[in-house]
Amino acid sequence: MKYKLFSDYITLQALLKEQGIIATGGAIKAFLANNTVLFNGEDEKRRGKKLRVGDQIQLPEQGVTITLIQPSPAEMEDYLAEEAERKRVAELVKQLNQGQKKAKTAKNPSVKGKKKPVRFPGT
């Protein structure tokens, strides 16, 4: 199996999670303790091991070999365009949320981010 690496590196934990080999990031410790993972032919037990283009991960018990390859220039251009769009949308959402918060505070100026204590009848 080939994995196209769009950044400088990916951690072993992130790669296994992204490939669906482990369900969550927290499962990596148990997975590494109970399974053999080979990094370029050598046993690897560090979940944070940085993997780069050209590295190979083998899971002999599962019969899986993952080779990290470099994407083509066109794929890289598409990836960068998608990342720019994600950042743009995230910034818009942030601005909208801040605007709603300001509008809510302006509507009820006595609140100003602080909640009034709960008052019970007869006290």
Image (cartoon, grey):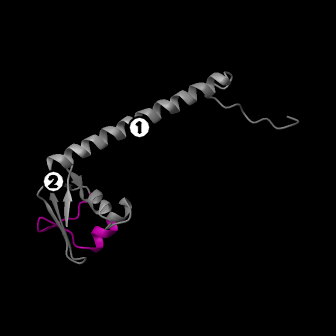
Asked where in the image residue 65 lies, by quadrant, the reply is bottom left
Residue 43 lies, with reference to residue 92, above or below; the image says: below
Look at the image and tell me whether residue 21 can be seen.
Answer: yes
Image quarter of the C terminus: top right
Residue at (50, 31) in percent of width and height: 96
Where is residue 9 shown, x and y percent of the image? 20, 50
Inspect this view and state whether residue 8 appears. Answer: no
Magenta extent:
29-47
In-front residue for pair 104/83 = 83
* Residue 78 colored in magenta in the image: no
Mark 2 crowd level (few <14, some 14–19, many ≥20, 10 Å Cα): some
Q: Residue at x 13, y 54 (%)?
A: 53
* Residue at the disc numbered 1: 90
Q: Indicate yes or no whether the magenta region holds residue 44.
A: yes
Judged left or right of residue 3, residue 90 is right
Please say if 34 is above or below 79. Answer: below
Residue hosting label 2 = 52
Residue 8 screen position, x and y as percent:
18, 47
Residue 109 coordinates in the image, percent (x, y): 66, 21
Mark 1 or mark 2, which has the lower sequence index? Answer: 2
Amino acid carrying label 1: it is: Ala
Viewer-side residue, 116 vs 21:
21
Task: Say what secondary structure mark 2 lies in.
Answer: loop
Relative to the observer, which residue lies in front, 72 or 107? 72
Q: Nearer the viewer, mark 1 or mark 2?
A: 1
Labelled disc at residue 12:
none
Tell me the quarter of the image containing the N terminus.
bottom left
Count of marks placed on residues = 2
**77 versus 38 height, above or below:** above
